[in-house]
Amino acid sequence: MRLRRGGAAAEAEPGAVATRAAENLAAAVRIATVTPPDGPLSESDAATFAELRALLEAAYPHVFAAASDAGSLDVVGRAGLLLRLPGASTERPVLLMAHQDVVPVPQDWQAEGWEHPPFDGVIADGRVHGRGTLDDKGALIVLLEALEGLLAEGWTPARDLHLLFGTDEEQHGPSAVAAVELLQERGVEPWLVVDEGGAVATGAFPGLSTPMAAIGASEKGITTVRLVVEGLGGHASTPPRESAPGILAKALVAIEAHPFPAALHPISVEMFEGVAPRLRGPLRAVLRRAGSLSGLLARVLPRVGPELAAMVRTTAAITMLEGSPAQNVLATRAAATVNCRIAVGSSVAETIAHLERVIGDDRVRLEVQEASEPSPVSPTGDDPRWQALVAAVADSYPDAVAVPYVMMAASDARHVARIAPAVYRFSPLLMDKAQREAIHGPNENVSIESLGRGVAFYRALLTGDALGPPAPNR
């Protein structure tokens, strides 16, 4: 494979590029940058993120020197990094993002089923193993690898290039929020933003034998609600007819028995129509007409599986339960946490109203713990930013079909959407079903070949025509 794109075309040995990325990723995995708790960083957490920064600066000296020489290397929030690499033009700047933090691993990680120690960064069987290889240090490393190689060749970005590497994406993203505020103060309005999210997925769609590069054009909103029921308490030997946990249990059963209404968003229609030519049989014929059959698909897809169900509706997941502190004591309070992912086109208010309606019991109090609306939908189709992403996918994964989708998880990109008109969520890494399930779970890993292709993706994106100098009045 030749890493070549636009005016910065360059020959490179793909094995060497991928191997170097794998070694640097393995080293980054060995630094356990677990998302810190809310509040100021502890000395230990600060030292851990400082260690990762030192590693990145040593591995990618051209990138950090370009930002430092321009006086554009800022620490944002809690050890987040915001870099600006000056371009030939300050018009229509580009913002590329990844995050340094990872989710924790149980102390007894072997019981969870890890084949390799999660923070050892083991390279084996053509893969890098460990926490963060996919979420999100893999994407961080391939981005920096691509930039380092280009800068070493004497390349200059056509536009100002901003890099944001948060340190608490897994904990609501306050570093990203601080970065957005700083960009606003400086009058920076990114023309294009790319953050983590979608991937080059295999086995993600029934009947699709080729990879699908799913690029998030929007993401669901989030509402975390705590359901609380008060009780009288007392001794378990004399239980009341209805207890606080019993009332709460009825509410939870009602939520699961009455899912949110299903509807097919235009982005999902575009995704289905995009993959249809790659399918065979009846499914191909149906999805080619996804727009006219949207009502039918909205009713059928939830029956296929949870991934497709989440694609067409707001979801409500019961995640935490609280009750009595002892086995022979009646609960004076029972509580449950419900995490809702709000479909694009709906809202926080509609989500709360649905929960109140299906519960139908004033004894159940709803306390909103967190709320953010769904993100705006970024342009697709003929828009040059979308076409730049599609072209970069074609360059790095020629057999993949690139389609838009609505991201169901949350990312730091949601904070940037308020200052940028085109925000996309995509990690240029190949993931099969087992790998996708390993994100936030045991045995997270990424193939070395995929890392090489990820570098090729960013080289193609950064040197393609769409990110070249802006034409007058374009």
Image (spheres, rainbow, N blue to C red):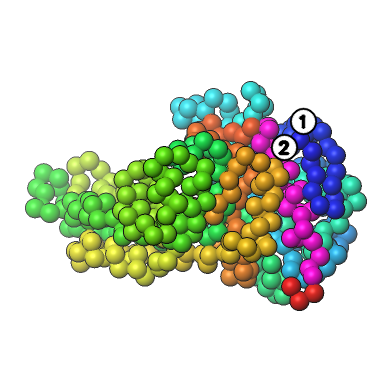
Which residue matches tag 1?
15
Label 2 is placed on what type of residue? Gly
Residue 437, percent from left and from top:
48, 38
Q: CA distance from mark 2 to mark 1?
A: 7 Å
Q: Image point 29% across, 64% down: which residue?
A: 354
Q: Would you say the magenta stretch is mainly helix, strand or loop? A: helix
Tell whether label 1 touches label 2 (CB within 8 Å). Answer: yes
On the rendered structure, is 189 left or right of 381? right
Is disc 1 placed on a helix, strand or loop? helix
Is disc 2 placed on a helix, strand or loop? helix
Residue 77, percent from left and from top:
65, 61
Is residue 368 among the parts visible in the rendering? yes
Q: Is residue 203 above or below residue 153?
A: above
Q: Image point 66% across, 36% down: which residue?
A: 450
Among numbered discs 2 and 1, the one appearing first in the sequence? 1
Q: Which residues are magenta?
A: 448-471
Label 1 is placed on what type of residue? Gly
**How many residues crowd around disc 1 within 10 Å: few (fewer than 14), some, or many (20 or more)?**
few
On the rendered structure, is 175 left or right of 18? left
Q: Nearer the viewer, residue 163 or 334?
A: 163
Q: Nearer the viewer, residue 380 or 139?
A: 380
Q: Indicate which disc residue 452 carries.
A: 2
Q: Image point 70% across, 39% down: which residue?
A: 453
Residue 268, percent from left and from top:
46, 56
